């Protein structure tokens, strides 16, 4: 299967001892199912690959294969390299001093059904900031998200199916996708 290059972001795999999905097994599973140029990145559920199927069919096929093999169905967020490049360019914190792990992208599967941004603003620490768009919640947390009350409560105040990646991971995935074009 050749086709479009996709960046796949799984939510909730290999965290807290739940939903074990070894990346080498994911790669083998996807290749056996006809996906090509499959490359994974770190154990938190990131994969770059090619698919000749539609976005919906690609997602369903991968989620179903994982469910059959591993017994759980992790949500998969698919993003094209072009769209990821656009999200990076639109990152409102790209010029901030702290980069890498201080900047986070919460990818939304669909637009938020509701968002209480005032409640989130009330939780911000001094230097923290955020911006919600149609398909991503940008978070700037220079002290780290482990200490952030705002990061802890995002799911309470933004009603959307989402998965998070830091800036370092997003940039690496985009580079991996760029390498496939060659």
Image (spheres, helix red, strand yellow):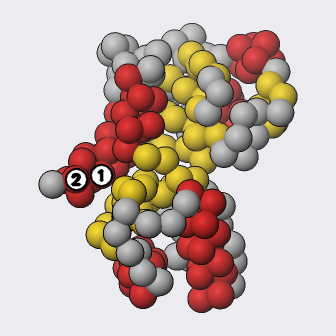
Which corner quadrant of the image does residue 69 belong to? bottom right
Q: Residue at 35%, 26% (x, y): give it.
A: 99
Where on the picture, by quarter, is residue 171?
A: top left
Seen in the image, is 116 located left or right of residue 174? right
Q: Secondary structure at mark 2?
A: helix
In x, y percent, where is residue 178? 24, 48
* Gap between marks 2 and 1 measured at Cα: 7 Å
Foreground pick, 117 / 32: 32
Residue drawn at 39 percent across, 57 percent down: 4
Whether residue 120 is situated above or below residue 75 in the rendered picture: above
On-image quarter of the N terminus: bottom left
Residue 64 figure quarter: bottom right
Vertical comparison of 135 with 44: above or below: above
On the image, numbered disc 1 is attached to which residue?
Answer: 177
- Circle 1 SS class: helix
| Outermost residue, left side | 182
Residue indicated by mark 2: 181
Horizontally, residue 28 falls left or right of residue 124, namely: left
Which image quarter holds the C terminus? bottom left
Q: Which mark is residue 160?
A: none
- Image location of residue 19, percent across then percent down: 63, 73
Residue drawn 32% across the image and 44% down it = 174
> How dense is the environment of label 1, judged by Cα within 10 Å: few (below 14), some, or many (20 and up)?
many
Residue 100 at what x, y percent from top left? 35, 33
Q: Nearer the viewer, mark 2 or mark 1?
A: 2
Are the residues tagged 2 and 1 within 8 Å (C-beta)? yes
Residue at the image point whose x is 83% and y is 33% from the top = 113
């Amino acid at each position: 299967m050749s086709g479009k290059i996709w960046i796949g972001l799984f939510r909730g795999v290999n965290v807290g001892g739940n939903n074990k999905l070894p990346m080498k097994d994911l790669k083998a599973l996807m290749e056996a199912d006809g996906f090509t140029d499959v490359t994974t990145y770190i154990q938190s559920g990131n994969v770059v690959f090619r698919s000749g199927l539609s976005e919906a069919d690609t997602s369903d096929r991968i989620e179903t294969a994982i469910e059959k093999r591993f017994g759980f169905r992790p949500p998969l967020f698919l993003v094209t390299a072009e769209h990821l490049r656009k999200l990076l360019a639109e990152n409102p914190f790209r010029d901030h001093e702290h980069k890498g792990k201080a900047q986070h992208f919460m990818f939304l599967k669909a637009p938020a059904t509701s968002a209480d941004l005032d409640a989130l603003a009330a939780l911000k620490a001094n230097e923290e900031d955020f911006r919600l768009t149609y398909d991503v919640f940008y978070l700037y947390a220079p002290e780290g998200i482990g200490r952030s009350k705002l990061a802890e409560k995002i799911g309470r105040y933004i009603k959307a199916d989402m998965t998070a990646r830091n800036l370092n991971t997003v940039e690496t995935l985009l580079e991996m996708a760029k390498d496939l074009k060659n």
